[in-house]
Image (spheres, rainbow, N blue to C red):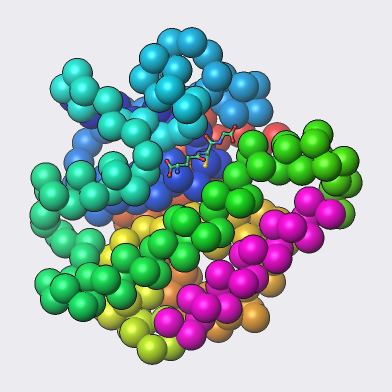
Amino acid sequence: MIRLHSYWRSGTSYRTRIALNLKGIAYEQVTHDLRKGEHKDSAFLDLQPQGLVPALEVDGDTLIQSPAILEWLEETHPEPPLLPAHPLARAQVRAMAAIVGYDIHPVNNLRILKSLRADLAADEAQVSAWIARWIAEGFAALERLIARHGGAFAYGDNPTLADVYLVPQAYAAERFDLDLNAYPRLNGVVAHARQHPAFAAAAPEAQPDADPS
Ligand SMILES: N[C@@H](CCC(=O)N[C@@H](CS)C(=O)NCC(=O)O)C(=O)O
């Protein structure tokens, strides 16, 4: 039994859904509405003590932290691989994923934005500028890396962890009105990845809890 605790618009949930779909793993989803603070309910804190989605229940155990979940998926379900065979190439893919996973997403997360507003009295224009600043810096680097290593996907011609991380971050960028045309290679591989059934099925608007209102 695999149960994903998630939220439709959460980027870390989205990346986990993409990887599960690419690996062909069936799972059920339990939603935690971040807007209502449901991720801080005590029952969920028993599973994920940080109160962050995603969490993945697997046969009675709970995995947390999407990078750890994705590595676990890769180790336990090696086909199709989301990392190339050569150690150097694996490090390059992991680096591209890390630009999103460690350098963009964490500083733009909901609790950080709430803290900017509550602790530093930032207004919405300042919050938007903050979000755009970190995405732009990371995407400028990724644009160069995709030009160097990319093919149909961000690294070569098959989906890798680089795409698993990038596509949800591109979705967030569009939500905050960033113009992806400034990153033509990045924009191209994201558009291509979105056509892939595993990515399409993982898209926020395709989730049972999607609520764009
Ligand atoms: N490093 C964690 C980050 C998880 C995370 O930040 N999840 C977000 C949604 S994308 C969340 O639950 N945010 C709730 C909050 O900030 O209060 C992971 O990759 O799993």
- Above/below status of 138 relative to 51: below
Q: Is residue 131 magenta?
A: yes
- Above/below status of 2 relative to 143: above
Compare residues 166 and 126 and report the one nearer the observer. Answer: 126
> Residue at image x 43%, y 82%?
145
> Residue at image x 41%, y 62%?
98
Where in the figure is residue 73, as x and y percent of width and height?
Answer: 20, 46
Q: Is residue 41 magenta?
A: no
Where in the figure is residue 19, as x and y percent of width and height?
Answer: 29, 50
- Image-based side of 74 in relation to 138, left or right: left
Compare residues 60 and 194 and report the one nearer the observer. Answer: 60
Q: Quadrant of residue 125?
A: bottom right
- Image-based side of 212 in relation to 28, left or right: right
Disc tally is 0
Q: Give the residue furthest to the front.
A: 119
What's drawn in magenta, residue-wise?
126-145
Where in the figure is residue 36, as x and y percent of width and height?
Answer: 65, 22
Q: Quadrant of residue 157?
A: bottom left
- Image-based side of 85 in relation to 35, left or right: left
Q: In which quadrant of the rendered image does the N terminus lie?
A: top left
Regarding residue 163, the answer to whether it shows in the image is no
> Residue at image x 21%, y 65%?
83
Q: In which quadrant of the rendered image does the C terminus lie?
A: top right
Q: Give the residue furthest to the bottom.
A: 148
Q: Quadrant of residue 212?
A: top right
Regarding residue 19, the answer to whether it shows in the image is yes
Where in the figure is residue 97, as x and y percent of width and height?
Answer: 39, 63
- Magenta span: predominant SS is helix
- Above/below status of 158 relative to 29: below
> Residue at image x 16%, y 61%?
81
